[in-house]
Amino acid sequence: MNIRFSLLLLCALLCLHTSLSAQLQWREVMPGVWKGTAGTPEKITLLNIAAARPDSAALGKLPSSTFPLDPDDISMKLADGKVYLRFPLERNEQLFGLGLNFKTVNQRGRVSQLHMDHYGGKDDGRTHAPVPLYISSRGYGVLVDAARYITVYAGTAVRTDTKNPPNGNKQWESQPYSDAVEMLVPAAGAEVYIFAGPTAMHAVQRYNLFNGGGYLPPKWGLGFTQRVPTLYSQQDIIREAKEFEAHNFPLDFIGVEPGWHSMSYPCTFEWDPNRFPDPQGFINNLAAMGVKANLWINPYVSPKSSLYAPLKPLSGSHTVWNGLVADFTLPKAKALFREHFLKNHIALGVSGYKMDENDGYDKWLWPDVATFPSGTSAEQMRQVYGIAMQQMTDEWFREQNQRTYGLVRASNAGASRFPYVIYNDYYSHPDFITALVNSSFIGVLWTPEVRASKSAEEWVRRMQSVCFSPMAMLNAWADGTKPWSFPEVETAVQEVAMLRMQLLPYIYSTFAQYRFEGKPPFRSMNLIDGFAFTPQLSGGKLDATLNPYEAKTRSELKDQYMMGDNMIVAPFFAGDSSRKVYLPAGKWYDFYTGELAGEDGVITVKARLDRIPLFVRDGGLIPMIPPRRQAPKPGEVLPLEVRVYGSAPGNFPLYDDDGNTFDFERGQYSRVLLKAANGKGSMEKPAAGKPFGYAPKIKWTFMTAQAK
Ligand code: GAL
């Protein structure tokens, strides 16, 4: 070996062992979306599995923007087989997102390791949607597209060479100011995306549109759904649907919980011949009542299933409850599922699935030492299993030109365009609302599902908020509850469920906005124009037992949200007699009475058991239909009432289509502008030949008495 060659070799070895620092090179891949590549990214990434396809036309309609950060302030280093990332952070910047959190909205000052799991009661990164995306109050977003357990130091770490040291420190602080978000990605490379603003909402819109736009559910998906107790037979379920008719309670789809399979833990995916002797008859009987069926599954394949033998070579090294864990990164494994599900369920008229147990828990799931035939590691599989299932099942329904709407317990980046709502077994009502607030930053939908309650008051409060969420659902799998389980509040519960049905034109148009503009239907106040929540610090008194580190508490706005552009929802929880509501700029009106509720500030509202507080902006239009038990069916034409609030002129783009198929993606929809000014309302004429389910004569209700 000559000397020069030895030196070169030594040099190469040294380079491998020491770290490599570099600046990320940013390329604008879509309007307002930049991509930087660190090291050698892996084949399995979150967005690859989600098969995200950007909606470039919609992205092009957002305000143009320049790269939102100083590229010199972003650094990247490859060392120890990992990617080290550092992004700048200003003093008053708030950070949102970083997974589906249940207790906190602002993630600044927190450390989390984003790890797919069933939520365990702590905001530490282990959650149902550990999306590695943060949205800054300064109006930009950062996504790290790697299917790994990423550690995020969201403004906690302080470097010796920082340009912005914590202010000279007059006093000891347990958490001094940090000027960076730092991340550790345990992989040889990662793709990083930056989404421009100018506002936080624009960054969220770009993220959702980059993933194809939000999902537009079928109309029936926005009606009420009841999930029946486990082991219910087909007769039990038909009886249950009839009870809903007798109680005049809304019902669009029924969730069939464990019991329809011949074995559920793990699943056979085959109908049980005793409880479901005639699946086709069962689906037809429900359909005759206008009700659809959604089937519960977990992904693990029972040795008793006909799928077991063909899937065995296409599955992981470890089982879950003795069932196979199919390798969904293999097209062959997906094809076997597709064939079976299409033939045995979807061809009969099954409308969708609840995909359970794909998130955690560690001691049940495949371990990180498991291997998969595709070579995908167990860690990657853990991070992507939920999105792989969403992508696969979504495709089956698109193939049928039929929209579905279902449930999933595991999600991740790239899920905006998938037809699934997240739920879990945790049950704090306030934390469920915080999750709803947080879902809006990370492109997922969440339902604060109702199961049981300790009192009639808690029952009505939970029912009220679930009716103002992406899926109005009672999950009675274990408790056998019915909406009328607390007779003393039956009327109040029925009223709020009917109110949701009345609001369907508003809610459906709001979801259309999610699809076409990427605006989340249920939104954190932090995404609203004309609103800035400034967190206040309090406490921090030394107490050797309760607060030994003099930690301060930071205020959060986590118990109110917006449904669409015009309406604030401020739920009450059991025990509350009053609550504060923060109002964005301008005048806001009580939805029920039309009276002025307040202007630019904080108001206090008194609790009323039969009402969930709702406020509408000045000039806000709310299109409604008469109360009804089921969402409009294709071809139905309904009378429309438009409620108008305040005195400012306003308009509302009313969206409609056939409510069921994907024909809207090929232009088969109507969007007409409803306009109101000076006590007069008008509606544009819908284009001829496009689906539009409202009668031309509209009832305009001016809710706010005008001062003479
Ligand atoms: C749980 C799920 C519940 C219910 C139950 C049935 O894992 O979160 O909603 O479906 O399984 O066994």
Image (cartoon, rainbow, N blue to C red):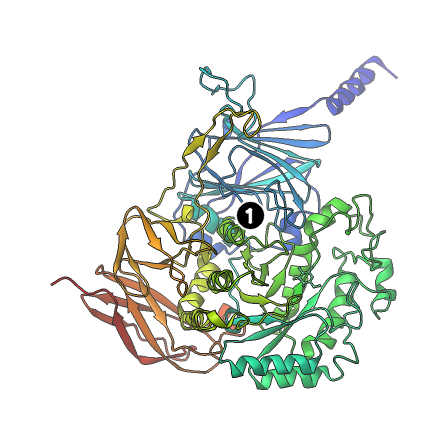
The image quadrant that residue 491 belongs to is bottom left
**Up-down: is 313 above or below 550?**
below
Residue shown at 43%/39% (left/top)? 137
Residue shown at 79%/46% (left/top)? 367
Nearer to us in this view, 408 or 243: 243
Furthest toward the top, the residue is 3
Amino acid type for the residue under numbered disc 1? Phe
Question: CB at mark 1 closer than 8 A to ligand 1?
Answer: no
Total marks in image: 1
Is the residue marked by circle 1 packed among few (<14), some (14-19), or many (20+) residues within 10 Å?
Answer: many
Quadrant position of the C terminus in the picture: bottom left
Place of residue 485 in the rendered image (x, y in percent of width and height, measured from the top left): 55, 71
Position of 152 with respect to 11 (left or right) is left
The image quadrant that residue 296 belongs to is bottom right
Place of residue 676 in the rendered image (x, y in percent of width and height, measured from the top left): 24, 66
**Up-down: is 102 above or below 348?**
above
Place of residue 83 in the rendered image (x, y in percent of width and height, measured from the top left): 66, 32
Residue to which mark 1 is pinned: 102
The image quadrant that residue 230 belongs to is bottom right
Quadrant position of the N terminus in the picture: top right
Position of 699 with respect to 249 (left or right) is left
Q: Is residue 550 visible?
A: yes
